[in-house]
């Protein structure tokens, strides 16, 4: 799979979860894809200071990304 195809899959996953984040005043953006195995995202808005952002990242973001792109092994958040 090309990087462009993988990026499209990941963006589609982010579009699925974006409305939930936006309901709480937050958002998310794709920062990078490393070696087609690791994804780095940035939580934005209220998600940055939210006390449950790591839970959101693991249970919501990572799970959704892996649903669309099962080859992804890790999802990281940068601020």
Image (cartoon, rainbow, N blue to C red):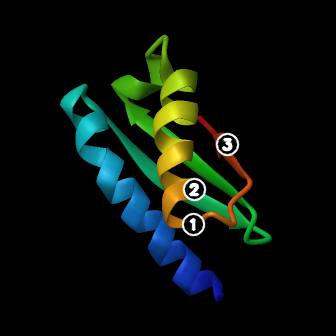
Per the model, the C-alpha gap separating discs 3 and 1 is 15 Å
Q: Picture coordinates of residue 49 (x, y %)?
A: 46, 17
Q: Are marks 1 and 2 in contact (CB under 8 Å)?
A: yes
Q: Are marks 3 and 2 in contact (CB under 8 Å)?
A: no
Name the residue that disc number 1 marks: 69
Identity of the residue drawn at 47% across and 72% down: 9
Up the image or down, 42 lies above or below 48; here it is below
Residue marked by disc 2: 66
Query: Few, some or many C-alpha atoms within 10 Å of disc 1 (few <14, some 14-19, many ≥20)?
Result: many
Kindly give the residue lying farthest to the right in the view shown. 35
Residue 76 is marked as 3
Q: In the current view of this chain or complex, which residue is farthest to the left? A: 23
Q: CA distance from mark 3 to mark 2?
A: 13 Å
The answer to whether mark 3 and mark 1 are in CB contact below 8 A is: no
Label 3 sits on a secondary structure element that is strand
Residue 19, above or below 54: below
Task: Name the image quarter holding residue 66.
Answer: bottom right
In-image side of 13 versus 37 (left or right): left
* Quadrant in the picture for the C terminus: top right
Q: Is residue 6 left or right of residue 14?
A: right
> Which residue occupies 54% across, 84% down?
5
Q: Which quarter of the figure has residue 70?
A: bottom right
Q: CA distance from mark 1 to mark 2?
A: 5 Å
**Closer to the N terminus: mark 3 or mark 1?**
1
């Amino acid at each position: 799979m090309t990087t462009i195809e993988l990026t499209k899959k990941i963006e589609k996953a982010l579009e699925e979860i974006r409305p939930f984040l936006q309901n709480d005043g937050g958002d998310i953006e794709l920062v990078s894809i490393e070696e087609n195995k690791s994804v780095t995202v940035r939580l934005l808005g209220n998600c940055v200071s939210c006390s449950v952002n790591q839970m959101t990242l693991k249970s919501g973001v990572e799970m959704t990304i892996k649903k669309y792109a099962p080859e992804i092994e890790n999802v990281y958040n940068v601020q």
